[in-house]
Image (cartoon, coloured by chain):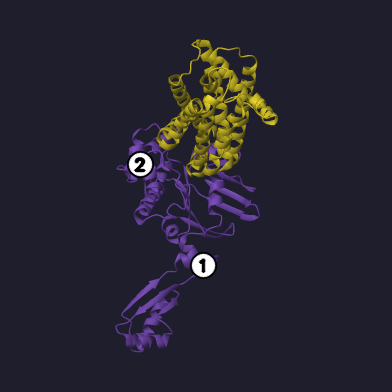
Amino acid sequence: MTDSLIFIGRSLRHSVRSVDALLTAIFLPVGIMLMFVYVFGGAIDTSGRYVDYVVPGIIVLCVGFGSAGTAVAVAMDMTNGVIDRFRTLPISSAAVLTGHVAASVARNVVSALLVLGVALLAGFRPTTEPLNWLAAAGILLAVMVAISWIAASFGLLVKNVEAANAITFVAAFAPYVSSAFVVPDTMPDGLAWVAENQPVTPIADTLRALMLDTPVGNDWILALAWCAAGIVIGRTAAAYLFRRR
Amino acid sequence: MAYTIEARGLRKAFGDTRVLDGLDLQVQRGEVFALLGPNGAGKTTTVRILSTLLAPDHGTARVAGHDVVREAKAVRSAISLTAQEAAVDGLLTGAENLRMMARLRRVKDKRRVDALLEQFDLTDAANRRVETYSGGMRRRLDLAMSLIAHPQVIFLDEPTTGLDPRSRNAVWDAVKALADGGTTILLTTQYLEEADRLADRIAVLAQGQIAALGTADELKARIGRETVELFFDDEETANAATAVLGGLKLPVDGAEDVRRILDDLADRGLPATRIALHKPTLDEVFLALT
């Protein structure tokens, strides 16, 4: 536990000191949100105010962007000699990764709050029901932990910084083929099927329903199941890959 | 007796490349042991196996009384590794790096960090990020991080490769101080001078096996005798002596040999004014053995 805290402190210091990565992780999602609300939003019909529709999806997108930073940070650690020093310490091997994941979640929380703040200025009018917000925060946290573990295992897998960056493409494009920005019904059949069956859709739908106080249905179960699967797979893969190297 | 480092029949291959081919090693407690060999001889692989980073394909190794594969955690409590590449965190400052290691190693003494910064001449740079350090500074910090918890066994993988003389001397001084304090040290090096200066015993590694083992003097003795070099007052005498002896650097076997040569020259009216005795260098040993 002590070791995990030490590594969380280390990764947080890294986050704050990698200024360019931090700015990308925080301001890119804000930029994308403004673009969707003001540039594309007028042309997209979602039966309701588009800003209300899109903000929950943007927050998921920004978690995805954040994951790229995590994959890169892990890959950088692995290519640096310092990891051999950690691996010859009598500590749990998971502590280093726990540090990365915790810092990743912390960065995600900051950028999600920032997106939310700017969204409110841009006309986002969510519910003020505290229980809904608590539930939304819970689901978002689960999403962040899941994506962070998957990103960490990806960083361990690819072994180099450039390749680690490639996860940005998956993380940045997956939300587009989902219900995050447009209603899947408007897509061609094949794409709509993908959109309806991939994790971003139930997650974005659940967040949207909670934030706007509309009926949630069973989507939240699916959303949490995806998160749980992501955490289990990401953690297991990361632990295996870390030991293998 | 129980050795602090003991390896038996270590084999390791990466794909088709056989790196270690039945390596045996015994290092006594408090000994400074050098693994000497060219690039690709298997030095780093040996160190990585002994420091629990790599499992051997065959063979066993025990360090500080524990098996490196089955009791890796116990081994890690006793050892410290300074790998070839400086294992420092570039985004942290020097002091932060040391403090992190102190906490991970559960070192309670708060003054230890400052003492190490001082010892390795890093006090002025303590609060600068390590990414701004020179290669020599990184290396010194690296070593300081390895020493934070007074490990029983230290592995140093080519500790001075690529260092400027000042940093190299700092590393050498630190190794000597550790050896005096009773730490068991296994170091690898390509530099024969380094092995000669630091190590109690040297193993010459070639093709994944120990090609020769002994003290520096023993290894030198295995290949060679000393050479006497003769000097004369003027070139004329020197040329005459060369004609008689066939050269001015002659292999000799003890003082009697030297006197015989000098007497012979004096009898011919070609007295040498000065002589120098050369021991064979480890470089010569190295080339002869591998």
A119 up-or-down from B191: above or below: above
Chain B hue?
purple
Q: Residue furthest front?
A: A43
Looking at the picture, tell me which residue is in the foreground, B12 or B59.
B12
Label 1: chain? B
B24 up-or-down from A32: above or below: below
Q: What residue type is labelled 1?
A: Leu
Q: Which of marks 2 and 1 is nearer the N terminus?
A: 2
- Kindly report the distance in space between the C-alpha atoms of the residues bearing marks 2 and 1: 39 Å
- Residue A188 horizontal/vertical position (percent): 67, 30
Residue A226 vs residue B165: left or right? Answer: right
Label 2: chain? B
Tell me what residue is drawn at x 52 percent, y 32 percent. Answer: A65
Chain A hue?
yellow
Q: What element carries label 1?
A: helix
Looking at the picture, tell me which residue is in the foreground, B62 or A208.
A208
Q: Which amino acid does label 2 sit on?
A: Leu
Looking at the picture, tell me which residue is in the foreground, A129 or B190.
A129
Residue B217 is labelled as none
Residue B287 is labelled as 1
Q: Is mark 2 on a helix, strand or loop?
A: helix
Question: Could you tell me which quadrant the C terminus of chain B lies in?
Answer: bottom right
- Residue B31 horizontal/vertical position (percent): 46, 50
Residue B141 vs residue A155: left or right? Answer: left
- Residue B194 horizontal/vertical position (percent): 43, 58
Circle 2 Cα neighbour tier, 10 Å, few/some/many (<14 / 14–19 / ≥20): many
Judging by the rendered image, the residue that carries numbered circle 2 is B116
Circle 1 Cα neighbour tier, 10 Å, few/some/many (<14 / 14–19 / ≥20): few
Residue B192 position by quadrant:
bottom left
Marks 2, 1 in one chain: yes
B154 up-or-down from A206: above or below: below
